[in-house]
Amino acid sequence: MKSALFLRIASALTMLMCLGHTGGVFSSPRHGAEEIAVLETMKAHHFNVMGSMRTYWDFLFGYGLILAIGLLVQAILFWQLAGLVKTNPVLIRPILALFFFNCIGTALLSWKYFFYRPAVTQLLVAACLGLAFATAAVSR
């Protein structure tokens, strides 16, 4: 397989993560009264952060949206790199390496602080990026 195909697969996996994360950000509580109580408490307590009144819910929701946007941009970038790797693979390799290590770090953090699905998906994306990196030098 050529590096462009690996990048297209990485793009598709990243887009799936984007869609899943976006759906999760807007989903309703599913774990009963205790979860609802925690969320209501997060929404109720306001505090001053750099001159703006915010809640822990604001941070949770906002970070969720920032991550969704970041995943969308990453998916689009991988798709675009798949087209560029055919013409100039040497210049694309450092970008692939950077995102490879980003995905490994994100997988480790996902495993420790969240759950296994995003960790496994990040590892699959990292594998695609690693294979794209390995084949980019000979993709011409």
Image: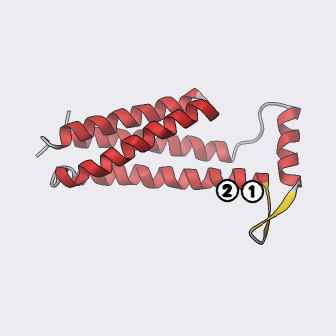
The foreground one among 80 and 51 is: 51
Relative to 21, 11 lies left or right:
left
Per the rendering, the mark at residue 100 is none
Residue 43 position in % (x across, y down): 84, 52
Find disc 2 in the rendering and name its residue. 62
125 w.r.t. 82: above or below: above
The foreground one among 139 and 15 is: 139
Quadrant in which the N terminus appears: top left
Which residue is painted at 57% across and 30% down in the image? 111
Picture quadrant where residue 33 is located: top right
Per the rendering, the mark at residue 58 is 1
99 w.r.t. 55: above or below: above
Question: Can residue 114 be seen?
Answer: no
Relative to 99, 63 lies left or right:
right
Residue 15 position in % (x across, y down): 46, 45
Amino acid of disc 1:
Asp
Residue 22 position in % (x across, y down): 60, 47
Picture quadrant where residue 24 is located: top right
The foreground one among 15 and 64 is: 64
Tag 1's secondary structure?
A: helix
Marks 1/2: CA–CA distance = 6 Å
Which residue is painted at 18% across and 50% down in the image? 89
1 w.r.t. 25: above or below: above
Tag 2's secondary structure?
A: helix
- Pointer 2 local density, CA inside 10 Å: few below 14, some 14–19, many at least 20: few
The foreground one among 106 and 34 is: 106
Amino acid of disc 2:
Gly
Which residue is painted at 67% across and 56% down in the image? 62
Contact? badges 1 and 2 (CB < 8 Å): yes
